[in-house]
Image: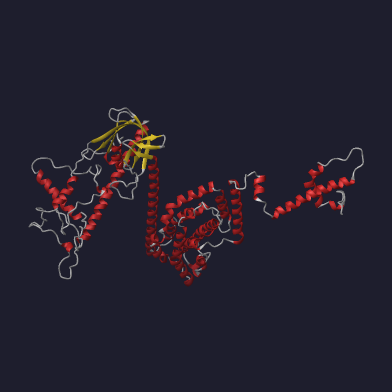
Amino acid sequence: MQTWASPEEGPLRGLVASRIEAYGGRHRASAPRPPRGGGSEPSRDRSLYHGAFAKASGQARGLAQAMFREPEPERRHGGYLKAGPPHSPKLKEIMKAQELEAKLHTFSMFGMPRLPPEDRRLWEMGEGRDSGLAIEKSWRELVPGHEEMSQERCHQQEALWELLTTEVIYVRKLKIMTDLLAAGLLNLQRVGLLMEVSAETLFGNVPSLIRAHRSFWEEVLEPSLEETRTSGQPLDPLSLQNGFLMFSQRFHPYIRYCLHVKHAMAYARAQQDTNPLFHTFVKWCEKHKRSGRQMLEDLLIKPHQRITKYPLLLHAVLKRSPEPRVRHALTAMIGVVESFLRHINGQVRQGEEQEGLVAAAQRIGRYEVLEPASEELEKNLRPFSTLDLMSPMLGVGPEHIRQLLLEGPVRIKEGREGKLDVYLFLFSDLLLVTKPQRKTHKAKVIRPPLMLDKLVCRPLRDPNSLLLIHLSDLQCVASALLVHCPSPADRSRWLEKTQKAQDVLQRLKAEEYVQQKRELLALYRDQARPRPASPDGSQGSADCGTPETEDGDPEDEGDPGYGTLGAPLRAPRADPRLTLSALELRRAPPSPPPGAGAASSGEEEAERRADEMLREIRREPAAPRGGEAAGPRRLTRAQLRRLLAPRAVRLDTPLSVS
């Protein structure tokens, strides 16, 4: 049997001795000392050194194996890190993190796997078509005679070349989101990782943007570049005219992206803050060689920056283009692009206003103005006890959304009752009086909504007080509230905001009324055009009117209430946007004073307005009877006078803040 030599001998020096010192020193120090009486026991010493070396060498072999073998999760984390039982949530998170790191390491070593067919059609842009995005380093490589060109022409070519090169760079950055971020996320989800992250919410319609820019490059920019490559002539700005004049049609997907980019960035930020695995994945993508050190938030905002850069690029070309024809074409292109950007900004603003209205509506609770005394009364009141703040404002266009302008606590007094602490909400078209509820954390509406077009605000002598007068349709007081604000500055703020909201509402209603009158007039002109005669030489049924009297007016006597086709004559449908309010009736002409000639002048005014309305009113087709075709319905002057009668409402008191 082979015996081990003492540590002083040569074979134990070197690596073996270092292992004994590193791992066996503790055992050697704890070994029993030899007896004091002298004589040592060599066999005992050898056995001690043998045991120490055996333990040290065993630990060294275990360490060497640990370098090439993954330790057992249960023993490593459950035994040493005290993570808990084998199926604890913390242990699962650790195992998920290890699996994610292994997958990302595989992606780095062997590349990104191809997506499955169902995801490939949407997210995979492919590499075959990227060869067309190749571009030279400078336009001077394509134009041999650039030395003889003027300095202004060279600057023009530089501006055009910047447009081309930035387009290529931008498309490549867009592909980072699809080929690296989206592809990596979807491949990880195939193995059960990051299942809680939505690629559609994170990246939106980026594939649609890439397709739009590829089409723009292949159909507009690349042909101009190929023409320069072939002929050696400078780049021609006129070759881009047709492409930029169709800018809104080509880049229509930007409307959807710009509407959701704010949510996408907030979603990405929230996922990185709350999801450690997603944070690890994003950091790996940002360090990847294909990302070019681009941050996720920077990539998400790139489309918004690019679409707003086109006018600047075209302006740079226009500045260096002295030819009148070229300047006219570039001006038209810039106008189309800027018009599309204004449309996007309007859509984004409307979306933000809609979100603000939703947030405000969620803070306002039930509409319980009346407290029914019995279940029967409550059942009958329930259908009419709903206040829908999301409904469109009356009398204005649908593109204008109700906004919350001001809110705050005040004290009100109604009649002889005591003062009540309330919370006011001032919207674009109404004022709400509410009472905060502690249990539901919402505000309960305790008074009927006060419409701004029927509201009069009067400051009082008390610097903190103002009077709110709500008028009825008959222009008399329907209700009055004495409002006591916390400070004079608060009162001034309420008066200023209310007056400004009333002015804006009046302007919007006037614009919408004029716009609808124009549409009705255009529709009347279209319907009044002469129709082609039928094969038998007679006019169509749409031209057949009611019998006329000698003065050319349709008969009023004995009118059974039917139109030309025998269908019952129906009153025009009431459009809430055409409802005249007190604000619109400020400029209404007063009624003629009583006396001589009053009846005749009023009759002439009614005749004049009837003739005007007859030319502009929208004629709806009557319901067909039997096999007859539907045609326009004609209204008599007497019927028009009856329709116009409600408009003769006077308003002597201006509804504005004094």
- Work out whether residue 451 can be spotted: no
Q: Tell me: residue 86, above or below residue 546.
A: above
Residue 487 percent coordinates (x, y):
37, 31
Front residue of 349 and 569:
569
Figure disc tally: 0
Instruction: Please say which color scheme the image uses.
Output: secondary structure
Where does the N terminus fall, quadrant-wise?
bottom right
- Work out whether residue 252 can be spotted: yes
**Residue at image x 47%, y 51%?**
264
Residue 394 percent coordinates (x, y):
29, 46
Residue 74 percent coordinates (x, y):
65, 48
Front residue of 620 and 53:
53
Q: Tell me: residue 204, above or below residue 589.
A: below
Where does the C terminus fall, quadrant-wise?
top left
Q: Tell me: residue 410, above or below residue 18.
A: above
Instruction: Choose top left, top right, bottom left or bottom right for residue 540.
Output: bottom left
Instruction: Choose top left, top right, bottom left or bottom right for residue 293.
Output: bottom right
Residue that lies at the very extreme toward the front in this rendered image: 375
